[in-house]
Image (spheres, rainbow, N blue to C red):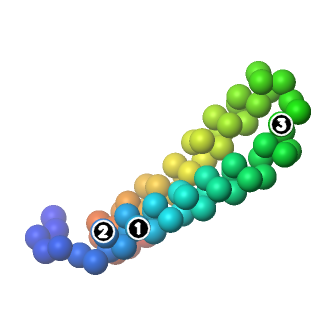
């Protein structure tokens, strides 16, 4: 258990925010031009997958923020 503050938590939160903003901008900029003409029911699973895709690296990132190790 951690007893002292660490620099990784504020840096990790800021990096996570920046990465999510960049990811959102990329998705908002490029995906509509690729699938914008598809029917809404076909677009829905694409946006659901893209909305959950950012969660994949989250576990390792949170471990790094707490311990300093990636695994």
Task: For marks 1 and 2, give the CA distance.
Answer: 9 Å
Question: Does dot 1 land on a helix, a strand or a loop?
Answer: helix
x 56%, y 51%: residue: 54
Residue 14 in which image quadrant: bottom left
Determine the secondary structure under disc 2.
helix
Tell me if residue 15 comes above or below residue 43 in the rendering. Answer: below
Q: Residues within 10 Å of mark 3 (few under 14, many from 20)?
A: few
Which numbered disc flags the more N-terminal residue, 2 or 3? 2
User: Residue drawn 50% across and 65% down?
Assistant: 18
* Residue 32 in which image quadrant: top right
Residue at screen point 60% across, 62% down: 22
Kindly identify the residue that appears in the image at 78 percent across and 52 percent down: 30
Q: CA distance from mark 2 to mark 3?
A: 38 Å
Residue at numbered disc 3: 36
What is the x, y in percent for residue 53?
A: 60, 47
Return the residue at label 2: 9
Does residue 41 appear to the left or right of 24 in the view shown? right
What quarter of the picture does the N terminus occupy? bottom left
Residue at the far bottom in the pictured view: 7
The residue identified by callout 1 is 14
């Amino acid at each position: 258990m951690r007893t002292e503050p660490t620099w990784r938590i504020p840096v990790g939160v800021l990096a996570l925010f920046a990465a999510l903003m960049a990811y959102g901008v990329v998705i908002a900029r490029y995906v509509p031009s690729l699938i914008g003409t598809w029917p809404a029911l076909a677009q829905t699973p694409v946006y659901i997958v893209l909305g959950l895709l950012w969660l994949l690296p989250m576990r390792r990132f949170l471990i790094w923020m707490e311990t300093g190790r990636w695994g």
